[in-house]
Image: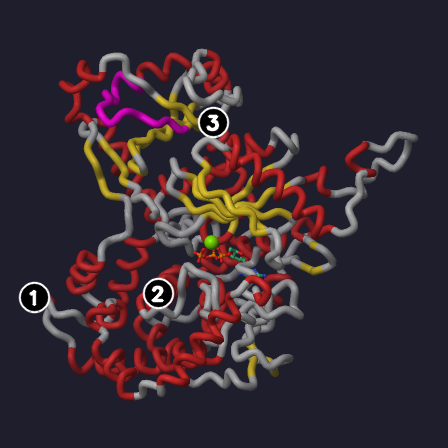
């Protein structure tokens, strides 16, 4: 069960601060709705990481006086930002202005003495506040007020969509309601930073970085937290220190392949998280997957985490998606819409299997936007031509070079509305020659499929790989059928738009809410396949999701 995040706020000046935060969180990282210069991905990562290093996580009693709490903490130094949320209990995220404040706080914090368990004396940045006299605090209770921080319920979403003025407005509403908030992003970077403290006990100069949808600007509230353990110099065995007679012991303790090294590193980190990781529960080591990983729940933040190492290409893919998301404000709106649509119709799932992944769907939207006339997004090859010397990047022999400065990319002259793009997206993929063509965002045009997988989306960096190799024919067919039906529903919309006061679902609402997609489910029923075929498909999905056939790498 994933706990809900509820942001707690206060009346008075603090509430005003939070309100401002909330407003500023609308543009999240990309600044795509602002005219301010857009930050490079690496700048955002650096800034956020530094913020997280000055931040602590505190489990608070539910009856707490915020004023006293902050007053107590500010004895250790000025606080630049804080917020409360509810996961399994009440938590505060407190960002100090200086890192030193944390050491000061740690120095006056005691390790709990337990009767039945021995505490490991690891100085974490995750604290627990125990009140001596909780009853004294009750008079101040009304101070903390809850504000919800979860994606909207279907009912609320349906209402919001019904009252929107246009389909464009509906897409923007969906984006606004589902995108990660400023606080959620802060908590993601903080969680990585807390895990890094632990991993650093083994690998001194390591870095734990978030990647995937937590940072690529396409994350929906509640999405998993993908982490990458970057061993930096330690990981590179052939550093240039070749002179001298001494070899470090770890360097001679060779293993036969890089994969085995990765498995061993993740194995010890997995053990470490399991035994000593404050708030880390349900640790699973999935070391035999194509990309080995450790999966666990960070209970305090409520995030489902996937930790990998040796995965620089995935971090580069996140940067590429970040760039695409920041180039035009229509990109994220459309991707969120397609992701929500796919989820509503069970085209995607949180369980790996033969279904399309969010990553593949995002690639399909990017490809579609490259195919518009004039194009809304440039090809990856074009982004490569804009790259400066500092952007040159080769990872494991793959050229991952592309421009990092967003301001060097000219905006598109295309003025199509979101409504028309959505309709066209469904038309385009409802009629795409999947049997012979591959989707290729590097060149921005279809290519002949080099192999026979039903859906072929070329991995933009490891170009001989297909990122959707896991998708089977029946899942692809389901996608195509739904795309056609959705195109049809949207084309009927123009003729049949209800007045806003009628409270009847229209536009996106008819496409997204399973309870109202009657026409789609009816059409599906009409064409329902014989039971034998459905069972065959089911078996096929199970087969392709079993570990030995784990072609769904999840990029990890
Ligand atoms: P959600 O978690 O579904 O919100 O999206 P996500 O983009 O984070 O996807 P996921 O957690 O499955 O994977 C994390 C990242 O790994 C992605 O953003 C990609 O950068 C990368 N990735 C995922 N699947 C693949 C794949 O099949 N091939 C490659 N090369 N990278 C992948
Ligand atoms: Mg993810």
Q: Nearer the viewer, mark 3 or mark 1?
A: 3
Residue farthest to the right, as pictured: 245
Answer whether residue 332 is magenta in the image. Answer: no
The quadrant where residue 233 appears: top right
Instruction: Categorize mark 1 by other alpha carbons within 10 Å: few (<14), some (14-19), many (20+).
Output: few
> Is the residue indicated by label 3 positioned so its CB lies within 8 Å of ligand 2?
no
Q: Secondary structure at mark 2?
A: helix
State which mark lies toward you, 2 or 1: 2
Task: Say what secondary structure mark 3 lies in.
Answer: loop
Of residue 162 and residue 483, the one placed in the foreground of this image is 483
Q: Which residue is label 3 attached to?
A: 54
Viewer can see residue 489: yes
Q: CA distance from mark 2 to mark 1?
A: 28 Å
* Quadrant for the C terminus in the image: bottom right
Residue occupying the point 48% across, 80% down: 473
Task: State which region is magenta.
Answer: 57-70
Element under label 1? Answer: helix
Task: Using the image, tell me which numbered label, if any, was put on residue 343.
Answer: 2
Residue 307: percent from the left, percent from the top?
A: 54, 46
Closer to the camera, 494 or 103? 103
Q: Which residue is mark 1?
A: 501
Where is residue 7 drawn, in percent x and y? 27, 38
Q: Quadrant of residue 204?
A: top right
Instruction: Indicate yes or no: mark 2 CB to ligand 1 under 8 Å.
Output: no
Q: Are marks 3 and 1 in contact (CB under 8 Å)?
A: no
């Amino acid at each position: 069960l994933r706990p809900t995040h509820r942001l707690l706020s206060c009346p008075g000046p603090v509430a005003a601060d939070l309100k401002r935060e909330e407003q500023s969180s609308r543009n999240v990282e990309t600044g795509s709705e602002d005219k301010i210069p857009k930050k490079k991905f690496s700048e955002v990562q650096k800034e956020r990481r530094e913020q997280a290093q000055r931040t602590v996580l505190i489990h608070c009693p539910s009856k707490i006086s915020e004023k006293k709490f902050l007053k107590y903490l500010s004895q250790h130094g000025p606080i630049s930002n804080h917020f409360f949320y509810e996961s399994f209990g009440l938590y505060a995220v407190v960002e100090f202005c200086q890192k030193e404040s944390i050491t000061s706080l740690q120095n006056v914090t005691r390790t709990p003495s337990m009767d039945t368990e021995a505490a490991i004396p690891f100085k974490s940045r995750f604290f627990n506040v125990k009140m001596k006299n909780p009853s004294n605090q009750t008079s101040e209770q009304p101070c903390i007020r809850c504000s919800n921080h979860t994606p909207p319920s279907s009912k609320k979403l349906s209402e919001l969509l019904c009252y929107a003025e246009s389909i464009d407005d509906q897409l923007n509403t969906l984006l606004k309601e589902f995108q990660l908030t400023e606080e959620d992003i802060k908590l993601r970077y903080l969680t990585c930073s807390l895990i890094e403290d632990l991993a650093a006990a083994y690998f001194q100069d390591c870095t734990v970085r978030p990647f995937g949808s937590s940072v690529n600007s396409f994350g929906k509230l509640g999405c998993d937290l993908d982490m990458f353990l970057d061993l930096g110099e330690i990981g590179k065995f052939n550093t240039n220190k070749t002179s001298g007679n001494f070899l470090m012991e770890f360097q001679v303790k060779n293993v036969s392949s890089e994969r085995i090294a990765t498995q061993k590193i993740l194995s010890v980190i997995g053990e470490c998280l399991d035994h000593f990781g404050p708030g880390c529960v349900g640790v699973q080591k999935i070391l035999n997957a194509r990309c080995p990983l450790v999966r666990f729940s960070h209970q305090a933040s409520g995030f489902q985490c996937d930790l990998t190492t040796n995965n620089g290409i995935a971090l580069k893919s996140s940067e590429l998606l970040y760039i695409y998301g920041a180039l035009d404000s229509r990109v994220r709106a459309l991707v969120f819409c397609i992701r929500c649509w796919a989820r509503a119709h069970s085209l995607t799932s949180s369980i790996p299997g033969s279904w399309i992944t969010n990553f593949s769907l995002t690639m399909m939207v990017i490809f579609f936007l490259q195919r518009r006339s004039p194009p809304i997004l440039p090809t990856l090859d074009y982004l490569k031509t804009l790259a400066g010397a500092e952007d040159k990047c080769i990872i494991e022999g793959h050229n991952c070079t592309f421009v990092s400065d967003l301001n060097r990319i000219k905006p598109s002259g295309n003025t199509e509305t979101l409504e028309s793009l959505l309709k066209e997206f469904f038309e385009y993929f409802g009629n795409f020659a999947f049997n012979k063509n591959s989707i290729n965002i590097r060149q921005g045009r279809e290519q002949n499929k080099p192999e026979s997988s039903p859906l072929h989306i070329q991995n933009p960096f490891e170009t001989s790989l297909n990122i959707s190799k896991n998708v089977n024919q029946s899942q692809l067919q389901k996608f195509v059928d739904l795309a056609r039906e959705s195109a049809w529903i949207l084309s009927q919309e123009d003729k049949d738009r209800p007045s806003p006061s009628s409270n009847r679902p229209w536009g996106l609402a008819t496409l997204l809410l399973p309870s109202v997609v009657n026409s789609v489910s009816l059409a599906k029923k009409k064409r329902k396949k014989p039971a034998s075929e459905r069972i065959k498909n089911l078996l096929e999905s199970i087969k392709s999701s079993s570990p030995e056939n784990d072609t769904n790498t999840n990029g990890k």
